[in-house]
Image (tube, helix red, strand yellow):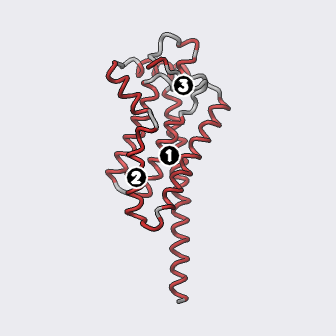
Amino acid sequence: MVELDRNLLLYLNSFHSPFWDSVMVFITGKLEWIPLYLFIIWLFWRKYRGKVWIPILIAVLGLLLSDQISVLIKNSVQRLRPGRDPSLIGLVHLVNNYRGGMYGFVSSHAANTFAFAALSASILRNKWYTLFLFVWASVVSYSRIYLGVHFPGDVVCGAILGLMVGYGLYFGFRKILEKNAATAGEGKKQA
């Protein structure tokens, strides 16, 4: 399995050019996506108005959970990133000689983007938004392989972790909304 992961990394990482190097550095960035996050906050506001803080809080919680769990897994498993693996030195295309931290399993980028995609898509329930967000999460995740900082297995397992966190939190979010609606209904009956 490890050998398959290495071979797949070397294959996927071999398709590079100066143009795509700069595109993938942009895609993998965090601050570059602030306009997207602001747009999503606006979408939350359109749907929930005065209760917009609930989906925002759940989304932030999802990002924190997926990020911290992925870091905990990285520090427990301690699988070297491709750019730090002595058997791959000189074989992996690294952009700007960036190697990332020491360990890479699981990818926090994949976990975070897939958690956010699963959670926000479930909250907003729009097929075009859902399609866009899952394509976005996939492209961000692929950028990590392209840049040589994660093996494909790191990304796939990070995405699975993110999906579990995202859908798990959405289930909790639904319960909060249902309880809130039930409490509001009881208040109207008593009035």
Who comes first in sequence, dot 2 or dot 3? 2
Find disc 2 in the rendering and name its residue.
40
Q: Amino acid at mark 3?
A: Gly
Find disc 3 in the rendering and name its residue.
100
Find disc 1 in the rendering and name its residue.
115
Residue ranking furthest to the top:
90
Task: Give how far across and how far down residue 103 sits, in percent.
Answer: 60, 26
User: What residue is at 57 percent from the left and 16 percent from the top?
Assistant: 85
Q: CA distance from mark 1 to mark 3?
A: 21 Å
Relative to the observer, which residue lies in front, 145 or 21? 21
Which quarter of the figure has residue 172? bottom right
Q: Is residue 45 left or right of residue 90?
A: left
Q: Amino acid at mark 1?
A: Ala
Q: Are marks 2 and 3 in contact (CB under 8 Å)?
A: no
Q: Is residue 15 left or right of residue 7?
A: left
Q: Are marks 1 and 3 in contact (CB under 8 Å)?
A: no
Q: CA distance from mark 2 to mark 3?
A: 28 Å
Task: Give how far across and how far down residue 177 sits, in percent.
Answer: 51, 67
Question: Does residue 113 lie above or below 17 as drawn?
Answer: below
Task: Give how far across and how far down residue 176 sits, in percent.
Answer: 55, 65
User: What residue is at 37 percent from the left and 40 percent from the top?
Assistant: 135
Q: Residues within 10 Å of mark 3 (few under 14, many from 20)?
A: some
Q: Residues within 10 Å of mark 1 (few under 14, many from 20)?
A: many
Q: CA distance from mark 1 to mark 2?
A: 14 Å
Task: Give how far across and how far down residue 11 sits, in percent.
Answer: 41, 19
Relative to the observer, which residue lies in front, 136 or 99? 99
Q: Are marks 1 and 2 in contact (CB under 8 Å)?
A: no
